[in-house]
Image (cartoon, helix red, strand yellow):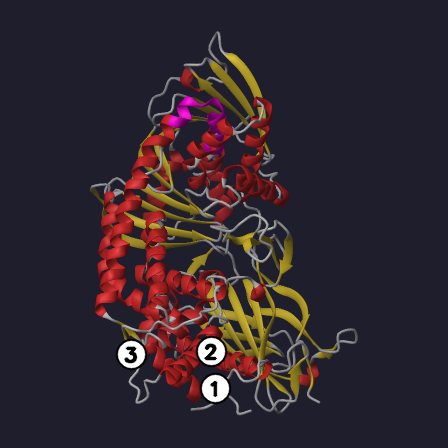
Amino acid sequence: MEKHSQKLLEFLERSGPPLYALLTRLTLRQDVAEDLMQELFIRLSNSRALDNAQNHDAYARRCAINLAFDWRQRSRQDALPLDGIRELASNDNSPLAKLIQKEELEEVLDAIGKLTGLSREAFIMRYIEQYSNEEIARQVGREPHQVRALCSRAMAQLRSIVNANKSSSTGKGMGNA
Amino acid sequence: MPEFDEKEILRRLEHISRIEPAPEVTGRALERVRNSLSTEQEKQERSRANIWRTIMKSSIAKLAAAAVIIIAFMFGMYFLSGPGAGVAFADVIRPILNAQTAVLDIIVGDEDTSPVITDMVMGSRIRRTLANFDAVSIIDLETARILTLEPKEKNATYIDLKGLPERKTANYLEILRNLINQLQDSPHFVVEELGEQEIEGQRAIGFRAKHPKAELTIWADPETALPIRIESQEGQLFIICKNFKFDVEMDPNLFSMDPPEGYTIREAELDLFGATEEDFIEGLRIWAEMLGEGRFPDDISVEHYVKQVPLIEEKFDQSELSDDEKVEVGLKLNRYLLFTRFFKGEGKWYYAGKGAKLGDADTAIFWYRPKDSQTFRVIYGDLSVRDVAAEDLPEPLPAEEEAQKTIGYQQWSKSEFVGSQEDEWHITASNEIVVDSHIELRKGPQDTALMPIVLPYEGGQLQSVTLGAELLQYRQIQPGRYEIELPLDKLFAGQTTMECVWRLPLEMLKRSAPYGDDRVKLQSLIPVTSYKLTVILEPDCNFVFSLDPSSRQWVPFFANTAGSAKTDWGVCGTGTQPRD
């Protein structure tokens, strides 16, 4: 047990901050990200899957992404406690601007939640974590050209999901900036 | 309403990517995780100490646990072996194959918290003991019978196992030899070298063998080739085998199926492969009503179940059930466990019932794909069941289930090439279909680098073939038939994804009278173990999808087989109709 716990703690020190940042970006809630972070590591602690995974970062990221989108499916957020988050250079920090901004981001994140499997994972790594195609390919065990194709298809899919949502719910979409 | 363009999506994504939690908040989150991990570890250590003490005290819990322990690890060694990719792997498995007797320790799940099972193997019989457990089981594979002896209570229980393969074998190790022969020709089975590492305090060389039903890692002494440690992932069960000794002298009396004098004899029956979805649902109901205070279990693995034995014991004691009723409930729980332990569906099962309440009709708690089914069975919190398409599942399938990645290309004794294939059929504005066939090559014959492919339609024209970034040479043999020159060095180096682009006039597809859409021959270019078809409508093409005209792509077909590879996957529709 000690060996497993020690490995997990080392993993927490090394990969905890980026995983927490990812959870914050996917939930837009620091408090929720904190809960999910705890749940993520408890799951990793109770499972040997992390030990068996060839790429620990990729495995933990996949778990984190699933947890975040499970949470998004389960709940509709009612507030945006982004206080404390160092983000978003903006000229307009008014409550209204923040609310609009939040709605815009939620719209895209909800649509990403409808992508599936590897395409969602690659898309998040490419556009939210800003990894290069080569780095993503290395992490998910594919070729860079396959990653490029995956992300490109995911983007097309995302566009149609958002547009379909916009046409089915009036007044929700924010349109082009 | 303006269309939502890519630029706008990118702007928002960039926005999200720039969100950074404050360092003090990150620090707090990490500290919370550290504290939770520490508490969790203490909890697990306490639980480990309690489990076996409790089991030993309770006959009911013993009954529930003993059957589980027997069934859970019964087939732990089934996938111990596989065909050798090279001499080294063959050397490593040879001691297992040649042994007349063997002793080994088996651990299921977490090495540090799970009990150690010791197996002595002689011929068709296994003598199984558990650390800190005052009972011993002798498993006789020839008669499909288990004898469990409890020396303190002088109880002897015979369990007749139902559902074992009909062809009986006289020798447990013979099963492994037979299995190797069966696996040898499996297109799925591949072996990867892991190099040298320190394992169990000694230098070891490793191999990982993969099959859709199991993944096996063997670490062996590089000098003697004797196995040091074997880890197997069979379905969702993780098993470690270690402390091997082969050809040890053993007293045959230790394997006797006759109980000693003065023992009380009981008889029971266990159908290993007979558990149904209904049995599983009944087990979920019992768990929620009797053990979980209205909630489903956190986990449904064997490992979790064994750890919950103290809880089962406590709840049984509190209940007003008679002894007979308790036994009946115990047997029902066994069948519930058997459903996932000897899972007969395709791929993995998924459980999401942690925290869910019995009666919650909106929460999907379990889903799986039955054998040969294209849809999933989803069980909800009210224990209703629905058939659901893959894309409508409560959670997307993990990436590895969507597309199984191979670990390399290997040659075998058969004359055909096999792999898996995903097709994208792009319907263009000029009423033509451009097909991207992505083939993941897995195995091929030893004596040739020329791979034949057959397009589903004779009128199809191959446009290009690439492996990675390299264009490959090909030549036409007959209409719709080609031969591709494979760069074997690249395949062996792990570059196994091939892309064949071919074209077909749309008019070559038959329009179906009952459905009104175009019918597609589902035929892979080479024999494959999985095939997926995606139809994509190019901008300005003359068609829309009937079900969702706003959509641009649709997956009308996806299937895989755990058996032999094939090219004919039937027929399906494109799901399209002419644009108004």
Q: Dot 2: what SS?
A: helix
Q: Compared with residue B392, is residue A177 higher up or lower down, i.e. above or below?
A: below
Residue B67 falls inside the magenta stretch: yes
* Label 3 – label 2 distance at C-alpha: 18 Å
The quadrant of the image that shows the C terminus of chain A is bottom left
Q: Which mark is residue A174?
A: 1
Residue where numbered disc 2 is placed:
A107
Q: Residue at x 37, y 62 (%)?
A: A64
Task: Tell me the SS state at disc 1.
Answer: loop
Magenta highlight range? B54-70
Q: Residue furthest top?
A: B262
> In the image, what residue occupies the spot 51% across and 56% down?
B414
Q: Main secondary structure of the magenta part?
A: helix
- The amino acid on which the numbered mark 2 sits, given as a three-letter code, is Glu
| Element type where label 3 sits in the image | loop
Q: Neighbour class for label 1 at 10 Å: few (<14), some, many (≥20)?
A: some
Relative vertical location of residue B273 with respect to residue B553 in this rendering, above or below: above
Nearer to the camera, B40 or A144: B40
The subunit carrying tag 2 is A
Q: In this rendered view, identify the residue nearer to me: B301 or B557.
A: B301
Q: Which residue is mark 3?
A: A87
Which quarter of the figure is the N terminus of chain A placed in? Answer: top left
